[in-house]
Image: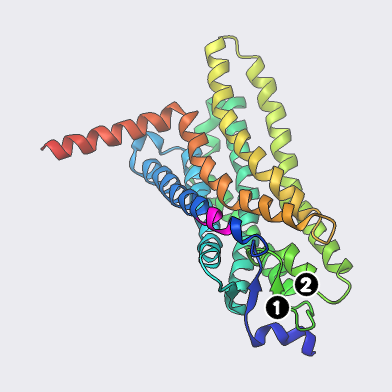
Amino acid sequence: MDGTNDSTQGNFILLGFSDRPHLERILFVVILIAYLLTLVGNTTIILVSRLDPHLHTPMYFFLTHLSFLDLSFTTSSIPQLLYNLNGRDKTISYTGCAIQLFLFLGLGGVECLLLAVMAYDRFVAVCKPLHYLVIMNPRLCMGLVLVAWGCGVANSLVMSPVTLQLPRCGRHSVDHFLCEMPALIRMACVNTAAIEGTVFVLAVGIVLSPLVFILVSYSYIVRAVLQIQPVSGRQRAFNTCGSHLTVVSLFYGNIIYMYMQPGNSSSQDQSKFLTLFYNIVTPLLNPLIYTLRNKEVKGALRRMLLDNRGVGKD
């Protein structure tokens, strides 16, 4: 009983990159800049999608939610990391650790499912263009988003308490820069085979099933696009889907590596840098991917800037 509840008596210690003090200052500057750019980029996507009438479509409705997810996901851990990198204090309260774990699992699960929803949106747009607005009506779009949020939160509600209640026999040092599930499982002083099996099963449902759905959707999309006769139309379809596929590749490449092997099998240093990439680089790149490859978003940004200049001159 003492081993189960000892972590509630005090704080956790996030070891992070403390074994490389020369790297901490560099990381602090780089991560701070990346975090600020992430805030600006994703907030811009949300504002543009909401304020420009031309972007009031299902695709940008889902993109708004993706940007909100990226903002929330990054903010759930990066401010704490910056605080720990900037001084000797590496602690986080038990409550703070529990909140981090819950948000990390929940928001990550929602994003997996939302990317699958966005793949379905692209499938309907390319394969059933004449029925697109009928099929992707506002009620369905809202329903799909609510299902994604509900399943992600439910997964986190199941896994967070189980992970936090593992006996740790007085261990308080988390060999990571945030309270994420694999690192907390490694702290346990009991056999974790059962929970690792549970994690694997849930990962199949939350991570791999949406990925399979995305791959199947894009197999139909590619077949439909190749049948488009005008080369310009074919190129436009590939560009629209290319942004989403790039985001999927960045997101799933990291999450599958980390969560399909939650125990001791992976290198901890490698896991830290992959999680850092997953936490800050991917949310930073997503707005760039969608703006640089998307004429509609660039046009909306241009209209907003011109309108603001016009108001300023008046």
* 113 drawn magenta: no
Is the C terminus in the top left, top right, bottom left or bottom right quadrant? Answer: top left
**268 left or right, relative to 136:** right
Looking at this view, is 25 or 271 the one in front? 25
* Residue 58 coordinates in the image, percent (x, y): 49, 39
Q: Height in image: 186 above or below 233?
A: below
Question: What residue is at 69 percent from the left and 38 percent from the top?
Answer: 214
Dot 2: element: loop
Q: Give the image location of residue 238, x and y in percent.
A: 59, 23
The three-letter amino acid code for the residue at tag 1 is His
Q: Residue at x 65, y 74 (%)?
A: 13
Q: Dot 1 corresponds to which residue?
A: 172
**From what the image shows, is residue 114 above or below residue 199?**
above
Name which quarter of the figure residue 14 lies in.
Answer: bottom right
Q: Amino acid at mark 2?
A: Met
Is residue 164 shown to the viewer in this render?
A: yes
C-alpha distance separating marks 2 and 1: 8 Å
Quarter location, residue 118: top right
The mark found on residue 187 in the picture is 2
In the rendered image, is residue 147 in sight? no
Q: Is residue 228 above or below residue 76?
A: above
Residue 30 versus residue 264 in the image, above or below: above
Q: Which residues are magenta?
A: 24-28
Q: Position of residue 159 (x, y in %)?
A: 72, 67
Give the mark nearest the N terminus, 2 or 1.
Answer: 1
